[in-house]
Image (cartoon, helix red, strand yellow):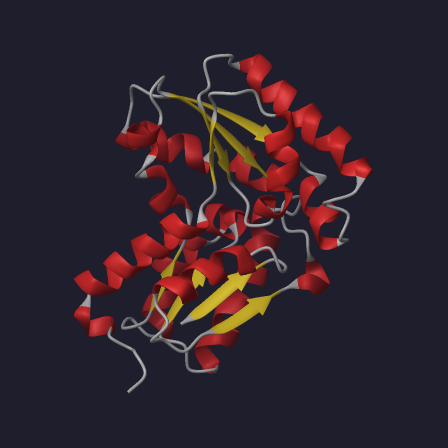
Amino acid sequence: IGIFDSGYGGLTIFDKIRAAMPGYDYIYLGDNARSPYGTRSFEVVYRFTKQAVETLFNEGCQLVILACNTASAKALRTIQQRDLPQWDPARRVLGVIRPTVELMDKISKSKHVGILGTTGTITSDSYSLEIKKMFPHMTVTGEACPMWVPLVENNEFDSPGADYFVRKHLEHILAADPEIDTLVLGCTHYPLLIEKIKAFLPEGITLFSQGEYVAASLTDYLRRHPEMDIRLT
């Protein structure tokens, strides 16, 4: 199983997947040299993601998880529909947005959800479109946090300087919709800011971190697709 992210934020997903499914062999690929992806165009994100998936396939991976929300938003569907049939129809490429969206109606009591993500993820409207498709009664508000990934990649996520950017975006999204009761960390880097986020988050709001839910969804996927049984023997 290959796991791809724009940097090392995807390790927050990998950690949960490996804990849930220790019987598999994994390769993790983080594109730190070209991070962040969030401000890049659809075409560039698609090209970079395609290169990463090809690399992981060439290393023998039968299944690749796009842990990166921006790559899931901007490249997943094109790779699944255009490239995968040409490479090898028996292999799979999966993202992290759908497993997250599937749980929103169960978790949110107010049915007002906020998405914290990169500029690319938010402008793509991927979360809003998927949630509205599954749960048309829900209200979705997105907030782009362009400085959060650089803070993590530069090991500044626990610095006093991070406080300003965390507080700013939390205040902005909650002002846009005061009824929000669930905030999705729609980027794999953001769990590394979780203590900062909790410090500025009002009581009564659920903070949704993707790792364990993506791991559970992948476990279920492999159970439902025995043809993808690629455990070590």
Of residues 21 and 3, the one nearer the viewer is: 21
Of residues 133 and 112, the one nearer the viewer is: 112
Of residues 63 and 196, the one nearer the viewer is: 196
Image quadrant where residue 201 sits = top right
Q: Residue at x 62, y 46 (%)?
A: 41
Name of the residue lying farthest toward the right: 161
Q: Is residue 74 left or right of residue 222?
A: right
Q: Residue at x 40, y 51 (%)?
A: 212
* Vertical side of 82 occupied by 99: above or below: above
Q: Residue at x 33, y 74 (%)?
A: 88
Q: Is residue 46 left or right of residue 39?
A: left
**Residue 166 location, x and y as percent?**
68, 31
Q: Residue at x 34, y 67 (%)?
A: 21
Which quadrant of the rendered structure holds the N terminus? bottom left
Name of the residue lying farthest toward the bottom: 233
**Residue 192 location, x and y as percent?**
62, 48
**Residue 60 location, x and y as percent?**
42, 82
| Residue 66 visible somewhere in the drawing | no
Which quadrant of the rendered structure holds the C terminus? bottom left
| Residue 132 visible somewhere in the drawing | yes
Image quadrant where residue 165 sits = top right
Of residues 22 and 174, the one nearer the viewer is: 22
Q: Is residue 14 left or right of residue 24?
A: right
* Vertical side of 122 occupied by 70: above or below: below
Image quadrant where residue 92 sits = bottom left
Q: Is residue 160 left or right of residue 20?
A: right
